[in-house]
Amino acid sequence: MPIITPCYPSMNSSYNVGEPQLRRIRDEFWYASKLMDKVYSGKEKWNALFESNGFFDQHQNYLQVRNVASFSISFPSVLELDLSTSVSR
């Protein structure tokens, strides 16, 4: 399943997705589909789409990365490389 990045240039990032991540993505799509069925049938309101999903309750360990610069250039590949190096240690 190709996973297309929402930035330019668009690229398929599915080479980073293993079986557990793919299972999680499919579960989220299934949940979203069921929620939309409820919205369309009138059992839920549209606001239900914007409620918290409990990510921090479901995962004890996570990594938040903030890329901050004082000038208008982004370093996504440098940041990705640095993250890959940090995680592999």
Image: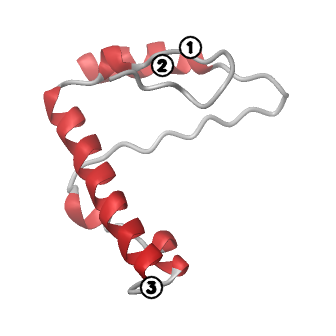
Type of the residue with mark 3: Gly
The residue that disc 3 covers is: 42
Q: Neighbour class for label 1 at 10 Å: few (<14), some, many (≥20)?
A: few
The residue that disc 2 covers is: 80
Q: Earlier in the sequence, mark 2 or mark 3?
A: 3
The residue that disc 1 covers is: 77
**Farthest front residue?**
41
Determine which of the numbered discs, if any, sits on residue 22 in the image. none
Q: CA distance from mark 3 to mark 1?
A: 44 Å
Work out whether residue 55 can be spotted: no
Q: In what quadrant of the picture does the C terminus appear?
A: top left
Q: CA distance from mark 2 to mark 1?
A: 5 Å
Work out whether residue 40 can be spotted: yes
Between label 2 and label 3, give the one nearer the viewer. Answer: 3
**Residue 16, position as x, y percentages in the image:** 32, 19
**Residue 43, position as x, y percentages in the image:** 38, 86
